[in-house]
Image (spheres, rainbow, N blue to C red):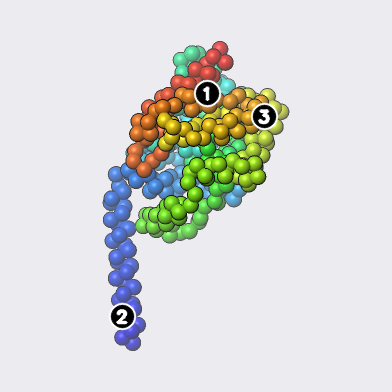
Amino acid sequence: MKKIKDIFISLIILIIGLFILELALRLINSDMSNYNIEMWKYANELKTQDSVLGHVHKKSKEATLQNVEIKLNSLGMRSPEPNPDKKKILFLGSSISLGWGIENENSYAEIVNDRLNDENLDYQVLNASVGNYNTFRYTENFLRNQTAIDPEIIVINYFLNDAEILPMGSGNFLLKNSELAASVTIAIKKMIANNKESLNEHYNTLYEPENKGFKLMEGSLAKLAKYAKAEDIKVYLVLIPDIHFLQDYPFLPIHNKIKTISQDYDFEFIDLYETLKGVSFEKLQIIPGDSHPNEFGHTLIGKKLSDILISELK
């Protein structure tokens, strides 16, 4: 009987200790400067699970994440509602083109939209980007859920890891509701990742022709290209470089592979490496621990893309 009582007391102490740790973590992270926890909150507050895509954005929802408001329209896009009187330019991509950590008016999607308006061009940019998407997910999301938008132009915002095969995500109650459980899981994943291949090795392996992720990416672009050709939609593929390495960039051979694929599918290819070349990571980093580009980076990208679109649409 005494053993059972001791075990019960130990469990109570453990539960109280975990509860105190949970409260302490939530207090520490209340300044919204912990990138991983903010991404965890993003998944909880603005995403809903999807059996094919892993997740999609909720509709007509908003949340303050990393001290920035992310407001989604009735289509689940980080844009105003579609204007029926304007032709549409649809941005597809992941968290970079979503404008993670950036006020929406300073994101490069909105910079492009504003500059087109300044030039009296009759277009509206709609930003369909979703965090933690790859090429399969953002092309399939468009083909399944967004074709009714009937865009004149699609802009694929491609990052090097868009060829990765992504896990479907977990419906685990504890991971969904506990910052402590989420933090422990993130720490374990980082430890495992640190023992794996280097980033150079990872990307080189990822872009081998027989890699499953590479083949899925290429097949997804082929599927989008077929649809775009049938519907007379012009497609731009914008390649975003890894901002960690802009002063000594090792991934240009991969850029050339993506360029070749773009040309094969009659996409207009735009490589942003030259736009960002030589800029230090520190000048582009948004906050410590977060590798997304800051407002300065979005300004450079927005100017480059809007210059190209304005020259072609005028």
Residue at 30% x, 57% y is 23
Which of the two labelled residues, at mark 3 and mark 1, occupies the earlier sequence position?
1
The tag earlier along the polypeptide, 2 or 3, is 2
Mark 1: which amino acid? Gln
Quick check: can you spot residue 70?
no
Q: Residue at x 48, y 58 (%)?
A: 172
Q: Secondary structure at mark 2?
A: helix
Q: Nearer the viewer, residue 199 or 9?
A: 199
Disc on res. 6: 2
Q: Nearer the viewer, residue 103 or 304?
A: 304
Q: Which image quarter is the N terminus in? A: bottom left
Badge number at residue 124 = 1
* Residue 198 image position (x, y, % from top left): 47, 46
Determine the CA span between mark 2 and mark 3.
69 Å
Pointer 2: residues within 10 angstroms few (<14), some, or many (20+)?
few
Residue 55 vertical placement versus 275 (above, below)? below
Whole-percent x and y of residue 169? 52, 52
Q: Three-letter amino acid code at disc 2?
A: Asp
**Percent coordinates x, y for residue 260 in the rendering:** 63, 30
How would you rate the neighbour count of disc 3 (Cα within 10 Å): few for under 14, some for 14-19, many for 20 or more? some
Q: Going from the N terminus, do you reach mark 1 or mark 2 first?
A: 2
- Please state the horizontal and vertical placement of residue 300, each as a whole percent of the image: 42, 24
Q: Which residue is mark 3?
A: 265
The local secondary structure at tag 1 comes to strand
Given residues 103 and 254, the one toward you in this image is 254
Which amino acid lies under the numbered mark 3 shown in the image of this protein? Answer: Tyr
